[in-house]
Image: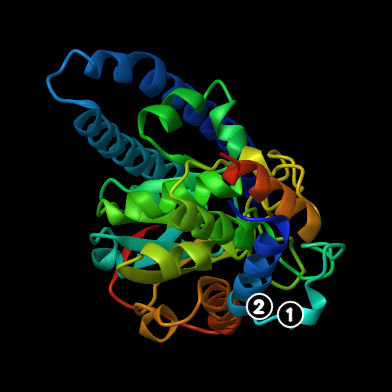
């Protein structure tokens, strides 16, 4: 029973990858980061260094989960990620999305959910890398606009949480508000995963019957000039509605090219 | 020193301009969220506007209990009090 064996293997490998992720987070946050405090440079330099480390660690992690046959992926257009003041927005079907995007974006900042600042495995890393919590709207918007104005590239998921399977896409307006205020460039990333791995409400061991394949595609930059002349509440409402429709359409059909892939 | 009526007039003007609302809707009893559809993202824009206008350090905490236009008038009145 080849099929059953690989299925059991993938349950085991998925669990192993979760464990690896947690241990990696701990090592980075509790050992590596404190060690980098001994290196020269101020807080900004340290934060940048940590973001670089996180990116490289996640790139390695992606290689491992690909190698262990937990997922396969193709990522088109990664050369357009990581520009100055770039806001990168993606839909959020699964738990692995942020891992893939950060792994292929040079040292980005991220808005991450507040729970990651409390989780002992991720707490050290998200603090050291200066990631932004989504816990308070006021702090999230000010943190994100400040990061973009400093020239960071910033990763956000406008859905705010993973997509509810079978439900229409919903975007919270915070991302659009931040884009209108402070983004030099707004770049969409469309994520598809077939069959779905770790969607919302699924326990980790319920792995899909086949190895999930991710297709990530960096879209064309979104022109913001039309929104800049409008009062912020109106601009962010219009942009949010446009983005929602755009992502809904693009996730229906599209095929990419020029892939960085792992099979 | 502004009176509460002056503050209300200012709020009416800025809310009407920012959110394209009918000034007649903006009464003291009007609830910001339910009646005027002003959400937490808008609240951030409003606070930024207030910070610019008053030049004061204003935190979201000062407005935590604000629910209606009347609450907003009271909160601003307290902030600009000498």
Q: Position of residue A201 (x, y in %)?
A: 77, 48
Horizontal placement of A246 versus A85: left or right? right
* Residue A126 visible at all: yes
Which quarter of the rendering shows the C terminus of chain A? bottom left
Residue highlighted by disc 1: B23
Cβ atoms under marks 1 and 2 closer than 8 Å: yes
* Residue A135 visible at all: no
Q: Do the residues indicated by labels 1 and 2 lie within the same chain of the protein? A: yes
Please, is residue A28 above or below residue A169 in the view? above
Residue highlighted by disc 2: B16
Nearest the viewer among A188 and B72 is B72
Q: Residue at x 57, y 78 (%)?
A: A234
The chain that hosts pointer 2 is: B
Earlier in the chain: of badge 1 and badge 2, it is 2
Q: Position of residue A135 (x, y in %)?
A: 61, 41
Q: Position of residue A239 (x, y in %)?
A: 53, 78
* Callout 2 crowding tier (Cα within 10 Å): few <14, some 14–19, many ≥20: some
Q: Residue at x 50, y 25 (%)?
A: A123
Q: CA distance from mark 1 to mark 2?
A: 6 Å
């Amino acid at each position: 029973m080849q099929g059953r064996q690989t299925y059991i293997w993938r349950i085991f490998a998925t669990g192993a990858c979760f464990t690896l992720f947690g241990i990696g987070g701990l090592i980075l946050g509790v050992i590596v980061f404190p060690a980098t405090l001994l290196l020269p440079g101020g807080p900004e330099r340290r934060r940048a260094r940590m973001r670089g480390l996180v990116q490289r660690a996640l790139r390695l992690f992606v290689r491992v989960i690909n190698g262990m046959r937990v997922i396969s992926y193709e990522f088109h257009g990664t050369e357009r990620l990581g520009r100055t003041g770039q806001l990168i927005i993606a839909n959020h079907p699964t738990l692995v999305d942020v891992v893939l995007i950060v792994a292929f974006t040079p040292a980005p900042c991220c808005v991450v959910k507040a729970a990651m600042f409390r989780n002992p495995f991720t707490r050290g890393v998200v603090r050291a890398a200066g990631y932004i919590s989504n816990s308070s709207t006021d702090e999230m918007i000010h943190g994100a606009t400040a990061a973009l104005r400093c020239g960071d590239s910033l990763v956000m998921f406008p859905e705010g949480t993973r997509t509810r399977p079978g439900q229409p896409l919903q975007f919270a307006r915070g991302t659009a508000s931040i884009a209108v205020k402070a983004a030099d460039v707004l770049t969409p990333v469309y994520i598809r995963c077939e069959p779905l791995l770790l969607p919302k409400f699924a326990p980790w061991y319920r792995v899909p019957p086949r190895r999930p394949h991710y297709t990530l595609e960096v879209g064309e930059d979104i022109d913001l000039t039309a929104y800049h002349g409008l009062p912020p509440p109106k601009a962010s409402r219009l942009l949010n509605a446009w983005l929602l429709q755009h992502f809904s359409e693009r996730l229906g059909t599209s095929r990419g090219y020029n892939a960085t892939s792992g099979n | 020193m502004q009176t509460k009526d002056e503050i209300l007039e200012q709020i009416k003007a800025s809310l009407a301009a920012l959110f394209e609302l009918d000034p007649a809707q903006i009464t003291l009893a009007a609830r910001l969220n339910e009646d005027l559809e002003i959400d937490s993202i808008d609240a951030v824009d409003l606070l930024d506007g207030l910070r610019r206008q008053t030049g004061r350090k204003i935190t979201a905490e000062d407005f935590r209990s604000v629910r209606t236009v009347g609450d907003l008038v009271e909160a601003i009145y307290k902030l600009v009090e000498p």
